[in-house]
Image (cartoon, helix red, strand yellow):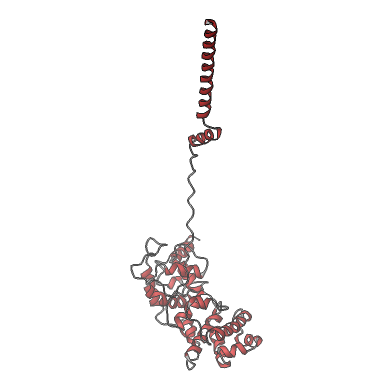
């Protein structure tokens, strides 16, 4: 009897020990994190890779949008292109004024504001100025002036031009350069003006530039000549060439529109209208595209182009 009880006690103890081990195992399994949790913890322990420093992006080119009401500039304005204004720019401008005081350039007597019929109504005169600008592209003032005079005799109004056959327009404006294309543009522009503007020309640069055959230079000059509003610098081939020769742009510019944007960054606004008139006539008489008269130019000692030409001549 006693043995049986001892055996039972031992069995009970063994059973209790087994149960304890089983329970401990269950608790261990219950407390152990699952594999996904372990993976997450390992991921958290991994240090993030060091990001490579990004390359500095080149700054986007400055976009100068057309504006009919530009910010007023003052004599203290400094360009975002130049740390200061170009060297000797005021002296250069004064010298050009002196060389232009006789007003003996073709632009002085045959410019776009000299071609219209002064007896015509205001909106017809504005239209005639616009046409003279359209014909002037890559054409000498003498040729443009003669063509506009023939058009005025023929009947230079939007209604008459829109109703005229294309071949007849070509005959009247010949020999202006690209006379066929210009005749097409004239006719289409006249139709647009009649349809949208009651025969007048638009009063903003943006609207003018949307007319067939009208570019920025023409639009800015039309605003100045026809509407008597200076909202930008009219830059033609003469202004473009001279501005680069004088180094009035931060770097050589490729076309007149780039030149316009660069010049408007630093030239005081009250000089914008004068700059076009001065430089166009100066380019026609002195600072010519071929064989410029550097030796007689008042800027020969301060003009970078003249100095370079002199050095080139002395070294050859």
Pick the residue in front: 78 or 51: 51
Pick the residue in front: 272 or 86: 272
Give the residue at x 47% y 75%.
234
Q: x and y percent of residue 11 in the render? A: 54, 12
Q: Is residue 248 above or below residue 214?
A: above
Is residue 142 in view?
A: no
Residue lying furthest front: 1
Pick the residue in front: 195 or 9: 9
The image quadrant that residue 250 belongs to is bottom left
Counting labels gives: 0
Asked if residue 280 lies left or right of residue 35, the reply is left
The image quadrant that residue 277 belongs to is bottom left
Give the residue at x 55% y 35%.
36
Q: x and y percent of residue 113 in the render? A: 47, 85
Residue lying furthest left: 76
Q: Is residue 36 above or below residue 278?
A: above
Asked if residue 100 lies left or right of residue 9, the reply is left
Q: x and y percent of residue 173 in the render? A: 60, 85
Quadrant holding the N terminus: top right
Is residue 126 in view?
A: yes
Q: Is residue 235 above or below residue 1?
A: below
Q: x and y percent of residue 242 in the render? A: 46, 70
Pick the residue in front: 314 or 160: 160
Asked if residue 84 lies left or right of residue 65, the reply is left
Give the residue at x 37% y 75%.
270
Give the residue at x 58% y 90%.
159
């Amino acid at each position: 009897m006693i043995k049986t009880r001892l055996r039972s006690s031992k069995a009970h103890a063994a059973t209790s020990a087994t149960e304890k081990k089983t329970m401990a195992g269950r608790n261990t399994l219950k407390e152990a994190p699952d594999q996904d949790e372990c993976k997450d913890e390992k991921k958290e322990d991994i240090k993030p890779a060091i990001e490579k420093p990004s390359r500095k992006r080149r700054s986007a080119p400055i976009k100068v949008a057309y504006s009919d009401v530009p910010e007023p500039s003052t004599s203290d304005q400094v360009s975002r292109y130049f740390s200061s204004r170009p060297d000797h720019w005021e002296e250069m401008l004064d010298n050009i004024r002196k060389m232009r005081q006789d007003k003996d350039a073709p632009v002085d007597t045959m410019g776009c504001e000299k071609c219209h019929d002064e007896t015509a109504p205001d909106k017809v005169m504005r239209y005639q100025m616009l046409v003279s600008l359209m014909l002037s592209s890559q054409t000498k003032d003498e040729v443009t002036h003669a063509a506009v005079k023939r058009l005025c005799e023929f009947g230079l109004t939007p209604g008459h031009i829109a109703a005229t056959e294309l071949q007849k327009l070509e005959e009247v404006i010949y020999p202006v350069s690209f006379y066929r294309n210009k005749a097409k543009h004239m006719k289409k522009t006249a139709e647009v003006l009649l349809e949208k503007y009651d025969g007048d020309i638009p009063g903003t640069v943006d609207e003018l530039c949307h007319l067939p055959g009208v570019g920025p230079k023409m639009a800015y000059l039309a605003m100045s000549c026809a509407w008597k509003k200076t909202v930008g610098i009219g830059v033609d081939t003469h202004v473009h060439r001279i501005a680069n020769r004088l180094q009035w742009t931060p770097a050589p510019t490729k076309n007149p529109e780039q030149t316009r944007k660069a010049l408007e960054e630093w030239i005081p606004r009250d000089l914008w209208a004068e700059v076009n008139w001065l430089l166009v006539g100066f380019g026609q008489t002195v600072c010519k595209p071929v064989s410029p008269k550097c030796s007689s130019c008042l800027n020969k000692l301060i003009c970078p182009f003249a100095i370079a030409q002199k050095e080139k001549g002395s070294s050859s």
